[in-house]
Structure formats: structure tokens, C-alpha cells
Image: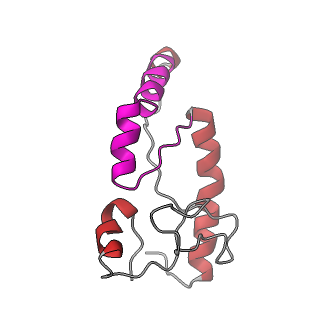
Amino acid sequence: MTSNTLATLGAQLKAGKLRGLGIGTKKRHPDYPDIPTTAELGYPDVNVSVWFGVFVPTGVPKQVVDALVPVVEKIFNSPEVIQRAEKVGIDVDYMGPEELRKHMEVQIPLLEKAARDANIPKK
């Protein structure tokens, strides 16, 4: 058993070498319509899709962060990045700094609860 990304496991799923039990996104993936979402499996608040963040160290001046945000947004919303991501099973859904912070504040406790409910020990 593993928990990973479609970018990593997609070829094995398509080849029938692995069976998908659940997908941690808000909706079923069009390439894998038979794999239920975590919401369909009884975890409606858990979106365990892989997300990436761009972070800077604490103390970076606000004007530097303010200059970086539109550049990062432009990159993540560029058609080239979106197309390349989709080819490996990644949906690009850009979030600004505040939205990402709120997402992390919600998702981390939900994932911790799901792990506790599944008796996955902390290390």
C-alpha cells in the first residue's frame, strides 16, 4: 500500500499493476473515473491532494514578498506550466499567500485526524 501522486503512480495504475483505492482530490480524476474521492469514502473535509508552496524565510521584507507574489502567480498560471503538470496528473490551482496559509491551517489538522483515525502512529 502507498499514498502518492498520480504523477508517480499513474503508469502503474493504467498498466493494472496497482489498484487505486481512493483519490484525495475534490473530484474524481478524469483519467481514473473508477477511483472514489476521499469525500466519497467518508472523509468529506479531507483534500489530500499534493500541494506545493513557495516559501521565503521569516523576516524577508514585505516589499520583497510583494514583488515575488505576482511573478510566482504568473508562472503557476502559465499555459506551459499547466500543460506540463497535467501531462503527469497534476492539477494546478494557484493560491495566493493568504489563501495558502488558510489552506494549510485547515488541512494539517484534518490530515492529522485522518491519520489518528487510521491508527497511523506518529514518529
Q: Quadrant of residue 56?
A: top left
Q: Nearer the viewer, residue 91 or 59?
A: 91
Quadrant including the C terminus:
bottom left
Look at the image and say whether residue 71 sits in the magenta stretch.
yes
Look at the image and say whether residue 91 sits in the magenta stretch.
yes
Give the dominant element type of the magenta stretch: helix, strand or loop: helix
Residue 57 visible, this orientation? no
Q: Quadrant of residue 116?
A: bottom right
Q: How is the image coloured?
A: secondary structure
Q: Eyeballing the image, is 114 above or below 78?
A: below
Q: Eyeballing the image, is 61 above or below 28?
A: above
Quadrant including the N terminus:
bottom left
Give the residue at x 63% y 62%: 109
Location of residue 14 in the rendering, given as x and y in whole percent from the top left corner: 34, 72
Q: Nearer the viewer, residue 65 or 18?
A: 18
Location of residue 103 in the rendering, given as x and y in whole percent from the top left corner: 62, 48
Give the residue at x 58% y 50%: 104
Location of residue 122 in the rendering, given as x and y in whole percent from the top left corner: 48, 75
Relative side of 84 to 98, left or right:
left
Residue 109 visible, this orientation? yes
Number of numbered markers: 0
Give the residue at x 60% y 42%: 101
Image: magenta residue range = 66-95
Location of residue 94 in the rendering, given as x and y in whole percent from the top left corner: 52, 37
